[in-house]
Amino acid sequence: MQNFISRPSRTNTNEFGHRREDSFDYNEFKNLASSLITCQHQKEWNHQPRLTQILLNQSLTVMFDGVILKEQCTLYPNVLKIDCHCIQLSQYQIKRKQLIHNNKKCYLLLLGNDIMLFFSNFDIQKHWYNQIKQFCIMKNLLVKYRLQEQLFQDFYSIIKKKNRQQFSAYIINKQQPFLEQTFGLLHESKNHSILKIKRIYEDTNNYVMITERFEGEPVFNFLLENIQFMEVQVATLIYQILLLLRYLNEHQAYHGNINALNILINRESQSLEIGVIGFIYYPFKQGDDISEYLKWVNLNKYYWSGFEENQIPGINSDLYQLGVLLYIITFYTKINQDLKRKSDPYKLFQKYMKELVIKYELIDETIEVLTQMKTPDSQYVHVFSSSQLDLIKKLLSNCSLSDALTHQWFVNAKQKAKPHNQRQGLPTLKTIIEIKEASDGEASKSQTKRFSIQSDMYDSMDECPTVSYLMRNILDYEKAPCKTHHS
């Protein structure tokens, strides 16, 4: 990089909008600007963009580490590249300011206390500000948004006051570790199962992530309501999560905290649309201390047996956690109704996970029962096939992502689903749940209702998939090219 002060200008004005014949003391201006930022930047500036869409690209005057420079600045999703420095924007707050020097205005953007961008034109400053702020940490949420209702623990519907546009709001405790890295991952991911971030706000104790609107609830809430899934629906749910894990793994990332509260199912959708929240991501290297991560996610000793071998979080831990989730769905039994009425789902989930014991002998015994063509224990309404149980065992024993994606259970579920795929206009989750609630109110003899989905066609596996399309393409995923998203 070259120092801006030593660089000659070919125009009649300098980079701050002053005519060359005007008296302009650069040292005086530099001292004035230096009072607004630190003399040495505090953050790491080596974050390579995951998404290569160029949002803005312009030669700008910048100041950091005590020098004023003229450099090419390129804005990617969540990354500002200044010369060779790649700056992750999700670790900064952004502010707009003005400096008046020699009766001339200079418009500024400040990223934390580390970086200052100079503009001679207000409209250009505003344009850069509007583009950058979508990735930065903002304040004063309630000035622009109004909370509507709580959908479940820490998840709300929210409305923008200016145009009444609806969004979702996900509240995250500031004590959660690795939030800068997690926010960066979410800003730089493009996958239908990851809720698209619109803004991130903060208050004293929490961050509030504003996302696209999602009408859904956690898998655990559906289990509490005794909603009985069909086999193809459980298989589709697991398969969509595996597709997300494949996407993350291709981008050297992972989820870090897969459980029955962080996988959401859309009640309004006739396809089994999911949304995934609760990410805890940090690019650990082998040998790094992961105790802070374990303290946050390790609700019980079954979260990943690999931690006993000092492995770092990654695709293996995600697959293990997915195995725990599938085990919970498969062998979930009804919770006492009195206890359910007295406790909220979040507390019930914590209690459930602390008491959870993964019974490998139960898996083997149930496989034996199914092999002998006998009926499994009626309390386990989501036990469908021996291949389903085999996948649970493999996920809990360090299988590969490829083996999981091509597992025989998905092939079998595809074959069983064919008659259902020919049906049209089947009710949504919301409709079935309303029917169930009405039925439960009539008499205690009512049975838990099964719900179905309508099969639609989509053109790409990376779009929102329906059951029929997913099932048809289970064995074809390796034929599709690995997609690094260039938006």
Image (cartoon, grey):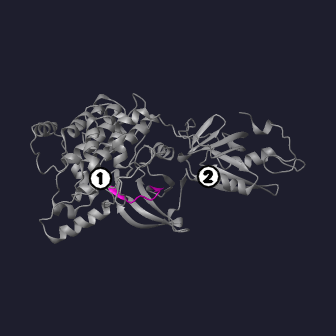
* Quarter the C terminus occupies: top right
119 vs 396, left or right, is right
Q: Secondary structure at mark 1?
A: helix
* Quarter the N terminus occupies: top right
Magenta stretch secondary structure, dominant: strand
* x and y percentages locating residue 277 in the rendered image: 39, 50
Crowd around label 1: few <14 · some 14–19 · many ≥20 (10 Å): many
296 vs 460, left or right, is left
**Mark identifier at residue 219:** 1
* x and y percentages locating residue 322 in the rendered image: 30, 41
* x and y percentages locating residue 346 in the rendered image: 29, 56
Can residue 23 be seen in the rendering of this structure?
Answer: yes
Q: Is residue 228 above or below residue 484?
A: below
**Mark identifier at residue 154:** none
Instruction: Give the extent of the magenta segment.
Output: 207-217
Tag in front: 1 or 2: 1
Tag 1: amino acid: Val
Residue ranking furthest to the right: 21
Which residue corresponds to mark 2?
131
In the rendered image, residue 209 lying in the magenta stretch gets the answer: yes
